[in-house]
Image: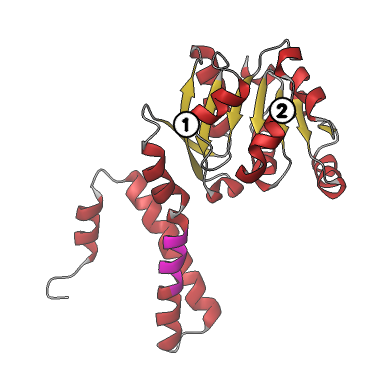
Amino acid sequence: VSENKKIGFIGGGMVAEAIIRGLILHGHDASKIFVSDPSDSRRDVLSILNKQLNVLSDNQTLASEVDILIMAIKPQIFSDVASSIDFKTVENNPMIISVAAGIEMKTMKDLFGQDKKICRVMPNTPCLVGRGVSTLIQSNLNESDIVMATYIFNSVGKTIWIQEEEWMHAVTAVSGSGPAYFFHMMHILKDAACKAGIPEEIAETLSIQTAIGSSQLALNSADDLITLKKKVMSPGG
């Protein structure tokens, strides 16, 4: 059962915290969640998040305890941190999931072993509020592993599996960088409203709520995006 699996996070930053919050919110037993971080202040924050969380400072101990190991660290330190864990002594053979941007499957196989269960994930920033989309690709995962990885990332939004790793470049551009385009568009709408004399607070609410409503309409409607656009546009402008 997914709720009983031990899930460990190496790195206790904002992405890890968001997933931990999502898992607990969706009913995962907090005592089955482990997280390690070198920062005393981050460990304190995570300890306050839920008293049952297992908050550690040692990555090796964590790796030996869990069924799923999530590498939630910055890409520039990924190799050093991964190399510091002796996987030959980790008998539980955890599924290893990376949320580090740009770390390819080949790199992970070289670091962890060609036969290891590995999953690469590209989440996006709306995951921080449980409305994100995470794109996943895997190697050596069985059906129950795929169910488990889907369960984890469904706790912070939608989950999409892809077959070709080269698609990750486009995924990063669309869902990874995409939020910045939407924020920019909302800012332009707000700015235009302010220039028309609308108070800033009202202009911001109008802009943000229009974005939320439009997204929900696109999600719920049977019409495609072009048709939805045409329905808003009046003839002759």
Left or right position of 128 against 173: right
Residue shown at 79% from the left, 39% from the top: 37
Q: Residues within 10 Å of mark 2 (few under 14, many from 20)?
A: many
| Residue 40 against residue 97 in the figure, above or below | below
Determine which residue is flagged by label 2: 8
Residue 41 lies, with reference to residue 159, above or below; the image says below
As helix, strand or loop, the secondary structure at mark 1 comes to: strand
The quadrant of the image that shows the C terminus is bottom left
Helix, strand or loop at mark 2: strand
Q: Are marks 1 and 2 in contact (CB under 8 Å)?
A: no
Residue 72 seen anywhere in this rendered image of the structure: no
Determine the residue positioned at 77% across, 29% down: 34
- Percent across and percent down for residue 146 are 50, 20
Residue denoted by label 1: 136
Please tell me which residue is depicted at 42% across the width and 87% down the height of the picture. 195
Instruction: Decide: is 99 above or below 139.
Output: below
- Decide: few, some or many residues near mark 1? Use Cα within 10 Å; few <14, some 14-19, many ≥20: many
Where residue 153 appears, as percent x and y from the top left, is 55, 33
Which of the pair 188/37 is nearer the observer? 37
Q: Amino acid at mark 2?
A: Gly
| Residue 110, position as x, y percentages in the image | 57, 24
Magenta segment boundaries in residue numbering? 180-187
Coloured how?
Answer: secondary structure
Task: Return the disc, 1 or 2, that comes first in the chain's sequence.
Answer: 2
Q: Is residue 13 visible?
A: yes
Residue 185 magenta-drawn?
A: yes
